[in-house]
Amino acid sequence: MLRSIFKSGINSISTHLLTSNNAVTQQVRTTFILRRKYPLELHKKNQKPRKLRGKHFNYVLVEDTNRTVKPDIEVVLKQFIHGVGKKGEIVKVRPNFAYNELLLTDKAAYATPENIEKYKLKEGEESQEEKYSSPYAQRTVNMLQNRVFAIVMNKEQPWVIEPWHVRASLRKCGYHILSDDAIELPQEKITGPDLQKQNKEFIVTVTINKMEKAKVRCRIHHWSTNPSDRLPYVYEHWLQDTEPLFPSEQKSNESSS
Amino acid sequence: MASSVKQGFATLKKVHVNKRFSVGLGAQVPEAYRKFWAEWMERQPAAVHYIPNEGRFKRNQKTGEVVPIQNVHIPLKRVVEENFGIWGGEAVIQGFKKPEMKHRKPCFWVPTLKRSAVRSEVLNEFFSVTLTDRTITLIHEHHGFDHYLLKSPACDLRSVLALKIKRKILIDLLNGCPAWDHNKTRQDEVKKEFSQYLEQYTPEEIEWYGLTYAEALAKTQKMIKEANPIVPHKQIFREKLIEQLKQAGLEEVTGEKAADEESSWLKKLNPFSKKKEF
């Protein structure tokens, strides 16, 4: 009876231990470079070292190699990769990224002289990167399209939305557009102030490197310099669904997506 | 009693003689395996867990005394788990931590393990194995997993799993990369890239490479059995008899039969016949 209880108790504890994922109880294990605290006495020439005694097993940690930053490695790309480079390009990347994303998936090879020669882009070869202005363009397009930008306009003074309004709003979020020519507004003019248009969405097309086009979602927000006149704050308003400013535009977007 | 008492040279000193390859079946293991065993177990591995001092001598700056530099390695423990992963020469160290003015505390230094994949070009296969960061660094340094295995001696690989994969790669290279039979151009490239490593080994050495001691003994036993098959005596004697009869010819056989009939009065006696009851 007691034995069975004891046994079941052990089992329950062991299962609990196996399933628990507590960071505090987890053992931290690292790779160590050690040295002896008490060095060995010299042994005779061409003879075996002296017998190790207990004190020779006292070690001092010299370095923990898991903590040191490993240098970047060079790889040759076998194909065009977004955000990394073109085919045949020699790129320096972090070792773990290179191993997990590029080398194991056979998208790149180590930058040995033979590999560099082998994967060099040959003349007249139809390359995929001609469709893209740069390896990083698609990344920028994705970043612009995955967000909602607030176009902050005045609540009292009349206005018409112009490209520089969009440029200023994007700059507030950390996206610097160098020229207004890259910003393409909707065909119809957007005028205000008009509280009917508050938090309504419209699409602005941003051209990157005169090639890639990003459809940026913008929402109008009315702002007053007088704090008492301001609209109440809406928590995480960018996550909420809104109506489009131009219903026809939304339909075309839905059909394209 | 007499067997438990030490005799001869052993009475003078404690002498440890390794009888692995000198007694019994171990004595019949071929030289090719002993070479591998020396590379695996007897050769000193590269310094992973300590920094060896360079040079032959050093001078004490205060006293001017010159002393030789002697690097004595830190003993590594062999654990069962390391045979199921590729730890890149790292191992468990048992020792003590000794803070100043305090008692020493026992401690085990264990490498950080993680599960990841490795890719073998020769075998055209992925393996999911437990690795350390050092393994991946070494793979990068050697420009590939196959190069790392083939360039490193067995003492630095340590684990049975790594040696098994190395053995399979060597056997595949010897047979001309059958894993790439579907793609002849790639097969030629792989052969060209890795054939340099075959020069270090003879085919017999590859046959015995990467085996554990127990496997080597089993292989030896099998070879001995195949060389000297056990045939029942019945078969041997029957063949002998048939040969003798063929040599003697029919005439003698008949002659024997006639002679038998003449002196066959004994045969008439049947010891197992029923006795008449008186």
Image (spheres, grey):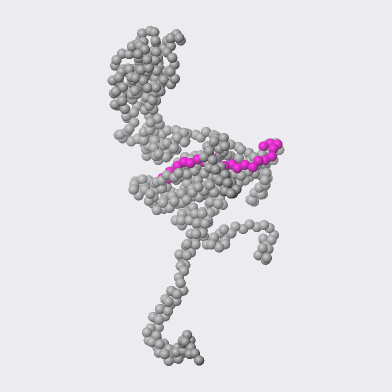
Residue A211 image-quadrant placement: top left
Residue A240 screen position, x and y as percent: 39, 22
Residue B111 colored in magenta in the image: yes
A212 or B122: which is nearer to us?
A212
Residue A78 screen position, x and y as percent: 37, 37
Q: Residue at x 36, y 10 (%)?
A: A193
Specify whether A110 is left or right of B41.
left
B148 or B271: which is nearer to us?
B271
Residue B264 image-quadrant placement: bottom left
Evaluate whether residue B54 shows in this view: no
Q: Residue at x 44, y 89 (%)?
A: B268
Instruction: Quadrant for the C terminus of chain A, please.
Output: top left
B219 or A131: which is nearer to us?
B219
Q: Is residue B5 above or below residue A22?
A: below
Residue A215 screen position, x and y as percent: 34, 23
Q: Which residues are magenta?
A: B99-121
B263 or A102: which is nearer to us?
B263
Figure label count: 0
Q: Residue at x 41, y 51 (%)?
A: B172
Residue B19 image-quadrant placement: bottom right
Evaluate whether residue B249 shows in this view: yes
Q: Residue at x 67, y 45 (%)?
A: A54
Specify whether A79 is left or right of B136.
left
Residue B36 colored in magenta in the image: no
